[in-house]
Each structure stands twice: as C-alpha cells, then as structure tokens.
Amino acid sequence: MDKNYEIAVFDVDGTLLDTTEGVLAAVKYTIEKHGLEQITDEQLLTFIGPPMQDSFAKVYGIDGELVQELTTTFRNRYKDYELFKAKPYDGIYEVFDELQKKGVKLAVATYKRQDYAEAILKHFGFDKYTNILYGADHQNKLKKVDIIEKCMNDLGVTDYSNAVMIGDSGHDANGAKLIGMDFIGVTYGFDFRTSEDVAKYPCAGCAHTTLELLKFFK
C-alpha cells in the first residue's frame, strides 16, 4: 500500500459488473439447444469469467469443432438477448470518479470478446472514464497478459512499476505477473472468496468491497 499507482487496469466480470444473469442464461440456452447433460449450479458458475471455450471443454471434457460450435451458439445468444443483463457493483462508479480525480489513468482488460466488451462498457457508462477497453479476439487466442499489454501499449507505458491490475481471478493475477505489474484481487466477484484465495498469487493485497480499492491509491 506504499505505492502510488498511476495506472489501474480493471477486469470486467466479477470486478466492474455482476454479469451472472446474462452469462448463465446464455450458457443454459446453449446446453439445452445442443442436448447436453444438465450440470449443477456450482458448475454453471464456473462459466463466468474464463474464455467460454475453456469452460465448455473443462466441464464436458470435449474439444475441437464441438467446443467451437457450442461457443458460437453461446455468443449469438448472449449478444442478441443477454448482454446487458448485468449490474454494476455497488460503489464502482465512486471508485472510478475518485481515481479520475487523483489523475490515475484507467483501462479495462477482459476476456469478453472485443465487440461485447465495448458494447457493455459503453452501455453502463464506463467509456466516460477511459476509451482503452480491450477484450478477447474472436478465436480467443489472446491470453490475459496479451490483453493487458494492449492496454499498456495504448497508454504508451513501458515502465509497469506504477501500474496495477485489478481483478477477481487467477487469470487476472497471472496476467499481471507475466507482464510484470502488481495485482490487487477482489473477493466480491466470482473466483476469489477470501483473502487466502488471493494470497495464493503474487499480489499487493485484496479488497472485499469496491470502495476498499481506494486504500491502494494515495
């Protein structure tokens, strides 16, 4: 907490927005449409955050063309019917307002596909804080570290010592580690539940609420 971060890169699902309703509705639709075996609520929740291909492959033990077919069905349903079924976390706009006042440069790096990321972030007004909004490519070849790097390149930054990634999952933590920047985990999202969960990864600390994030910025 003794660092004075000048740049903050945020994840979306589980960090800025609770996207549970829309994502799970599209996953359930995909499962039913393709006649797949029903899964538990706990398994369903694992679909929120990671690349969709990875989730279908892991839960159903499948790969190849079938995974891509399922992902395409999910994407079409999510884009056309479920995208805006999300809720900003309490206090997140206050956090962005305060960081903007402090002169912190803001960016967003998410595993949501680029067009979805832009649409949902503009819908909920996050584009008024930054136009650096990066998501995954259509083939999901980009890893989280690649998406974070695109943000940093747009910011014109090569020194990451005063930058921090903020997210709710190991994907975010690992992406930050690989690029050489600090990480703050949040436990109000989908993956991390406790401080101990966050501490399994290299981190500068954790926040249990959105407003707790402000303690990391002077």
Image (cartoon, grey):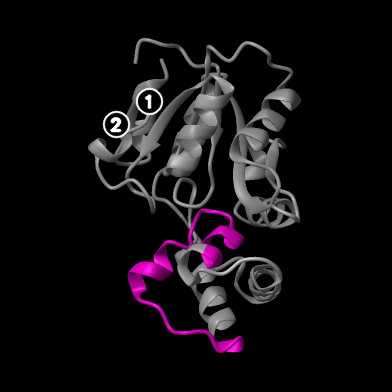
Q: Is residue 36 above or below residue 97?
A: below
Task: Tell me, yes or no, whether the highlighted magenta stretch contains residue 41.
Answer: yes
Q: Residue at x 75, y 26 (%)?
A: 154
Q: Position of residue 148 (x, y in %)?
A: 63, 32
Label 1: which secondary element:
loop
Q: Amino acid at mark 1?
A: Cys
Range shown magenta: 32-57
Q: CA distance from mark 1 to mark 2?
A: 7 Å
Residue 101 in the image: x percent, y percent? 53, 23
**Residue indicated by mark 2:** 199
Which residue corresponds to the image point at 53% horizontal and 11% vertical from the top-left?
A: 161
Please state the horizontal and vertical placement of residue 207, each as a whole percent of the image.
32, 35
Asked if residue 56 is among those painted magenta in the image, a careful observer would answer: yes
Instruction: Tell me the residue at 63%/72% (across/down).
Output: 74
Give the position of the C terminus as an image quadrant: top left
Q: In the displayed structure, would residue 199 be above or below residue 14?
A: above
Total marks shown come to 2
Q: 10 Å neighbourhood of mark 1: few (<14), some, or many (≥20)?
A: some
| Badge 2 density bin: few <14, some 14–19, many ≥20, Cα 10 Å | some
Q: In this figure, which residue is indicated by the disc labeled 1?
A: 203
